[in-house]
């Protein structure tokens, strides 16, 4: 028996993620495993560096027992899934009306200036930041707002608040552990 | 059974029938156009909004009108329902708007499109549209993708009817294409480079209402109106294939093979890729005779007809319709 | 000071824990309903309360519940719509993150009323951190016998799960939400069939907004009649208003329906007036999709009566001079705001969020945005305004779901009330596109 040696290793979920996926799949009727699509895609994005590569999406398809195209149809529909490699931190800047009224356009320009990354472009030169404009984050009373992973940074209308956010992110060695990662981050994430 | 009145004509149909199919049971020019609905494909319909009609009375029990126009292809009839299509100025005006929407991003490359002459969008635009455009913005484009040696995908022409997705889902084991992205960036694609390859994949060409999916083996060979359709069959070795087709001749050459369609352009029986792409010799087939081509192809009549308007019921037609009517008097119902 | 039926304890230390929530009277509605009421009696109380759907449509919740099909032996579902994404609206996020047990309690009581044994909370994916908070609250409810098998020894079983979205406004539309919950693209379904007959997994399903579900708790505790005493006419009870934009004190306010709009904007109990000492120019009162109104029409109706924060008063005058309460997303704009820019921003939103399934919305939302983008950037032409109005009309009412209307209304209303400002952008593009430019008033066009 021989295995091809030139193809990249197939991605695999960590044991902790597998257990979490099992827990989630039990929330739906057994014949409706596809229902777990979005939660599993979120786990995949957290596990594999903040984006879902085609082979990661294929893995999701395999785990859910669906055709790969069924995952592609979903991952390209919802804006939270990054389909290209991203920087260590993805800054999702709300650009919708209420945030715009309170300075989100200016905030975007400022973040572009400080990080050197461009909205809609690749990561900053230091690999730390990807800037992404998003629509309403449901935090309009605390505008302008940026989301990074699961955290909201609000009222970013002063230099101090913007700097506080960026320095917190710069000082972050790994992304925060998720509830099912009590025993620590998966090696792949920790070694990133 | 349910009895409904459609454009002033009564028809009785089984419960659960859609308004569109009730109209088709009447037939003729009162039938609403359908760009996405496709009877053989479960789940199709409701998307293009070409078939919107006005329900003037919901049912005998509840005769109130429905507040909005409804998609006749997915709305079931109720006993006593009264529906207006060609008799409603509102419907005809809204339909003009739908044509405009479908065309603003359409490339209008009919002169180089193999679908021209049998294109539902051409028919729809000709019958219901206006001849000018108000659209000044840039038209949408897509990255070209290759889906294999048999089928050509022109995404810019696509109207996102989803028919090809339903076809692949319902006819084949492993669907590899679907609708990706969303909004006006949504597109038919395979995501990772992938060839649509299975024994029934060619049927997506027949179901496509526009020139988005065309037969690569027929590409640029001939305008369809210069070809002669002939019914033929063969004893196909594929048990799932009916072997009943239409051969499209130019002189003695079979340029193209398609499934047979009914008068609404719907495939009657699916055919396999062997019949469609590999059997292009007359000797492969038993010839039955000339195929009757209905209004969905320009071959049939060599001219387009306006929809039949039931003028006695419409009191005040929109000005544009009146002008059209004067220039192209329509057929009348009944006589 | 108005009564606070939902948020009275929102600032109590530890209220997100079962123990503290319970100490403040939490889960009484579950006990009362399950031990002393039949499911139908609970539905009856909700009907009596006059509660109207708090997600934006304002449809009577009790009536929606009574439409639920109940075929023998077929499971039915309650799904909570926590996909809050209507621009200007952020009440559900606050409610869920601070008072997670209130939603859990409401879900249990409501599920009991509807006879659902499995219920889901569909929360927008951006709020994964709130999903964690809710899952913790749910685990506590299981541990204390309020969820799971044989709740409070009654024989009633209920499992409650939280399901995240993935970033799509359209999933706030109930059938798109159900598609999404089934693991698919969020394409709204054709109706009929309605969810009450064929919803999640083709089973009878009720979909309710977070705030509606939460309101079931005080309704069951105090009775529907008590709830209906609050408010004005058919606008009963309290409503969470998300106040944002150019206000001195943006935030969430639980108001008794009927507060005058003027009081809401200017009194210190609520928003404290317009920021930076400026004047109010316009308000979008119920989330970005409802018609914008200029100051004079939001404070008073066309007939000169005080406009109140009620469904009826806000819609007084129809769309000619009125608007809607909608989701309660209250966006105030000061007198320096560019209405063209704001309309373009909203159009960009709907263009971005259209699912792309039906042609008027897929093509029309993009068309609107492109014209408005040109106008805002000084490349408008004379006929653009009429084309805008006409395209909006071509979308409205002709789409599968209400996103079509949501995209059309803001454009139609902005033109209706601020046409001169659009004309100014067309005729004086250099002035209008100057950074910080403020419309000098219609005299400039004379």
Image (spheres, coloured by chain):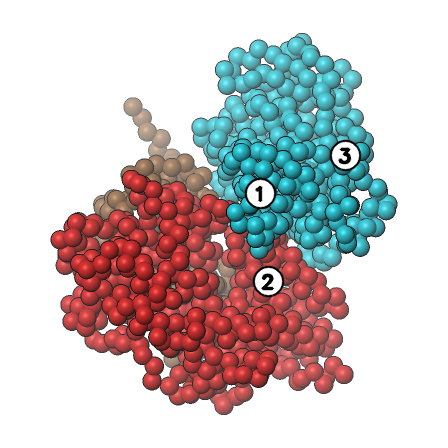
Chain colours: A brown, B cyan, C red
In-image side of C233 versus B316 (left or right): left
- The C terminus of chain C sits in image quarter: bottom right
Q: Which residue is mark 1?
A: B80
Q: Which mark is residue C408?
A: 2
Task: Pinpoint the chain carrying mark 3.
Answer: B
Question: Mark 2 or mark 1, which is nearer to you?
Answer: 1
Task: Pinpoint the chain carrying mark 2.
Answer: C
Task: Give the percent coordinates (x, y) of residue B323.
Answer: 83, 50
* Snapshot quadrant of residue C408: bottom right
Task: Pinpoint the chain carrying mark 1.
Answer: B
Q: Which residue is mark 3?
A: B334
Task: Give the percent coordinates (x, y) of residue A189.
Answer: 29, 53
Give neighbour class at mark 2: few <14, some 14-19, many 20+ (Cα, 10 Å).
many
Give neighbour class at mark 1: few <14, some 14-19, many 20+ (Cα, 10 Å).
some
In-image side of B9 versus A40 (left or right): right
Camera-side residue of C223 and C173: C223
Q: Which mark is residue B252?
A: none
Give neighbour class at mark 3: few <14, some 14-19, many 20+ (Cα, 10 Å).
few
Q: Which residue does the image show at 57% across and 84% down from the upper left?
A: C304
Task: Give the percent coordinates (x, y) of residue B57.
Answer: 59, 49
Q: Is residue A150 above or below residue B321?
A: below
Labels 3, 2: one chain: no
Labels 2, 1: one chain: no
Q: Which residue does the image show at 64% across and 41% down from the upper left?
A: B5
Task: Give the percent coordinates (x, y) of residue B198.
Answer: 50, 26
Local secondary structure at mark 3: loop
Q: Is residue B239 above or below residue C243?
A: above
């Amino acid at each position: 028996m021989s295995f091809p040696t030139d193809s990249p290793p197939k991605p695999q979920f960590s044991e902790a993620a597998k257990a979490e996926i099992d827990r989630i799949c039990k929330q739906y009727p057994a014949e409706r495993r596809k229902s777990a699509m979005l939660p599993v895609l979120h786990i995949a994005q957290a596990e594999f560096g903040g984006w879902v590569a085609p082979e990661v999406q294929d893995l999701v398809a395999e785990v859910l027992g669906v055709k790969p195209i069924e995952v592609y149809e979903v991952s390209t529909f919802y804006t939270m899934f990054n389909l290209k490699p991203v920087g260590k931190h993805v800054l999702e800047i709300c650009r919708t009306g209420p945030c715009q009224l309170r300075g989100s356009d200016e905030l975007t320009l400022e973040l572009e200036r400080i990080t050197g990354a461009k909205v809609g472009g690749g990561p900053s030169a230091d690999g730390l930041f990807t800037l992404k404009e998003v629509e309403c984050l449901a935090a309009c009373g605390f505008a302008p707002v940026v989301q990074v992973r699961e955290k909201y940074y609000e009222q970013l209308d002063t230099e101090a608040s913007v700097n506080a956010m960026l320095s917190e992110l710069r000082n972050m060695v790994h992304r925060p552990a998720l509830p099912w990662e009590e025993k620590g981050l998966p090696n792949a994430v920790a070694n990133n | 059974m349910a009895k409904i009145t459609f454009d002033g004509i009564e028809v009785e149909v089984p419960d659960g029938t859609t308004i569109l199919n009730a109209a088709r049971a009447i037939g003729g020019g009162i039938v609403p156009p359908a760009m996405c609905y496709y009877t053989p494909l479960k789940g199709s319909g409701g998307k293009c909004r070409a078939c919107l009609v006005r329900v003037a009375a919901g049912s005998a029990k509840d005769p109130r009108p429905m507040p909005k126009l409804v998609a006749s292809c997915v709305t079931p009839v109720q006993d006593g329902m009264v529906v207006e299509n060609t008799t409603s100025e509102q419907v005809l005006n809204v339909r003009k708007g739908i044509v405009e929407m479908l065309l603003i991003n359409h490339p209008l490359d009919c002169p180089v499109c193999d679908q021209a002459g049998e294109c539902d969008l051409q028919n729809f635009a000709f019958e219901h549209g206006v001849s000018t455009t108000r659209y000044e913005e840039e038209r949408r484009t897509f990255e070209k993708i290759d889906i294999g040696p048999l089928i050509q995908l022109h995404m810019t022409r696509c109207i996102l009817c989803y028919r090809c997705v339903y076809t692949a889902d319902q006819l084949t084991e492993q669907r590899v294409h679907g609708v990706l992205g969303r909004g006006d960036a949504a597109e038919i694609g395979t995501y990772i480079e992938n060839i649509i390859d299975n024994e029934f994949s060619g049927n997506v060409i027949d179901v496509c209402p526009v020139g988005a999916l065309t037969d690569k083996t027929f590409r640029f060979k001939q305008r369809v109106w210069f070809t002669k359709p002939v019914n033929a069959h063969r004893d196909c070795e594929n048990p799932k294939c009916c072997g009943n087709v239409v051969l499209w001749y130019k002189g003695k050459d079979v340029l193209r093979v398609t499934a047979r369609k009914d008068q609404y352009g719907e495939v009657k029986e699916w055919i396999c890729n062997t019949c469609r792409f590999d059997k292009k010799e007359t000797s492969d087939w038993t010839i039955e005779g000339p195929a009757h081509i209905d209004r969905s192809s320009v071959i049939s009549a060599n001219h387009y007809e306006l929809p039949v308007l039931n003028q006695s019921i419409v009191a005040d037609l929109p000005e544009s319709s009146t002008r059209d009517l004067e220039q192209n008097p329509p057929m009348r119902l009944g006589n | 000071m108005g009564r606070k039926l939902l948020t009275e304890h929102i600032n109590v230390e530890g209220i997100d824990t079962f123990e503290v929530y319970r100490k403040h009277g939490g889960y009484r509605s579950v006990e009362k309903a399950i031990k002393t009421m039949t499911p139908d009696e609970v539905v009856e109380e909700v009907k009596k309360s006059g509660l109207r759907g708090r997600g934006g449509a304002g449809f009577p919740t009790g009536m929606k519940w009574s439409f639920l099909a109940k075929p023998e032996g077929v499971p039915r579902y309650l799904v909570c719509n926590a996909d809050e994404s209507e621009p200007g609206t952020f009440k559900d996020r606050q409610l869920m993150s601070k008072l997670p047990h209130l939603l859990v309690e409401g879900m249990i009581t409501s599920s009991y009323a509807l006879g659902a044994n499995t219920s889901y909370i569909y929360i927008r994916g951006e709020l994964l951190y709130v999903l964690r908070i809710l899952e913790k609250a749910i685990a506590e409810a299981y541990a204390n016998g309020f969820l799971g098998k044989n709740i409070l020894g009654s024989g009633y079983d209920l499992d409650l799960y939280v399901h995240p979205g993935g970033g799509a406004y359209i999933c706030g539309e109930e059938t798109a939400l159900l598609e999404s919950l089934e693991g698919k693209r969020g394409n709204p379904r054709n109706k009929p069939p309605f969810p009450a007959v064929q919803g999640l997994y083709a089973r009878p399903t009720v979909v309710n907004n977070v705030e509606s579900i939460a309101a079931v708790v005080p309704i069951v505790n105090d009775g529907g009649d008590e709830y209906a005493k609050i408010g004005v006419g058919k606008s009963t009870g309290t409503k969470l208003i998300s106040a944002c934009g150019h206000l001195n004190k943006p935030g969430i306010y639980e108001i008794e329906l009927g507060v005058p709009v003027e009081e809401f904007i200017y009194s210190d109990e609520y928003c404290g007036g317009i920021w930076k000492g400026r004047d109010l120019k316009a308000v979008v009162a119920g989330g970005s999709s409802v018609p914008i109104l200029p100051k004079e029409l939001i404070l008073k109706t066309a007939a000169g009566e005080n406009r109140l924060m009620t469904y009826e008063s806000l819609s007084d005058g129809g769309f000619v001079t009125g608007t809607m309460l909608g989701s309660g997303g209250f966006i105030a704009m000061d007198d320096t705001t560019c209405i063209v820019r704001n309309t373009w921003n909203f159009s960009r939103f709907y263009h971005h969020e259209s699912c792309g399934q039906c042609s008027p919305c897929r093509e029309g939302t993009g068309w609107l945005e492109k014209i408005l983008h040109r106008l805002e950037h000084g490349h408008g032409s004379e006929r653009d305004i009429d084309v805008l109005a006409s395209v909006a009309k071509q979308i409205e009412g002709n789409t599968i779901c209400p996103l079509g209307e949501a995209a059309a209304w803001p454009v139609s209303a902005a033109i209706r009330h601020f046409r001169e400002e659009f004309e100014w952008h067309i005729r004086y593009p250099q002035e209008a596109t100057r950074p910080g430019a403020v419309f000098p008033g219609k005299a400039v066009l004379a």
